[in-house]
Image (tube, grey):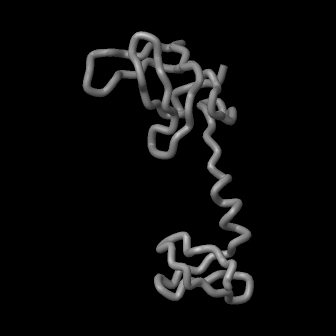
Amino acid sequence: MSTLPACPQCQSEYVYEDGSNLVCPECAHEWNPNEAATAETDKVVRDSVGNILQDGDTVTVIKDLKVKGSSLVIKVGTKAKNIRLVDGDHDIDCKLDGIGAMSLKSEFVKKV
C-alpha cells in the first residue's frame, strides 16, 4: 500500500513519485512534499511597526478608523485584547469595548 499523501489541490489518492517531487495524474499538480510542509507555517502577520503578532496578543489602534456601515469611529489608542489571527484581507478578529466584534487589518495596529 502507498503511504504517499493525497494531492493538495484535488485530494486525489493516485499520487506517484517522480524523483524528489510528487505528481498527481488527475490534475497534473507537481509539488515537493518537503517544501509543502514548511509553506503552511510561513504565514507571518506583522503589525505596523514590524512586530510579529500571535493569537492572544494585545494591540492598540494607531489611527482613527471609520466602521463601515455605521457612524462609529474607532479612536486612536483603542486597545484590542486577546486577538485572533485569521486568513484574509482583515487578518485580526477581536472584540472592542463599546463596539463589539470587529475585524481589523494588521497595518493599522501596534503590539502593546
Q: Which one is in front, 108 or 92?
A: 92
Residue visible at 46% across and 17% down in the picture? 96
Q: Position of residue 78 (x, y in %)?
A: 51, 13
Q: Picture quarter containing residue 66? A: top left
In the rendered image of this protein, does residue 90 appear above or below residue 61? below
Q: Which one is in front, 67 or 82?
A: 82
Residue visible at 51% across and 78% down in the picture? 12
So how many labels did they put on this image? 0
Q: Picture quarter containing residue 102? A: top left
Quadrant of the snapshot with the N terminus: bottom right
Q: Residue furthest front?
A: 1
Q: Position of residue 41 (x, y in %)?
A: 67, 53
Q: Position of residue 60 (x, y in %)?
A: 57, 19
Q: Position of residue 81 (x, y in %)?
A: 58, 19
Residue visible at 68% across and 36% down in the picture? 52
Residue visible at 55% across and 80% down in the picture? 13
Quadrant of the snapshot with the C terminus: top right
Image side of residue 58 versus residue 98, left or right: right
Q: Which one is in front, 40 or 16?
A: 16
In the rendered image of this protein, does residue 104 appear above or below residue 72? below
Image side of residue 53 versus residue 89, left or right: right
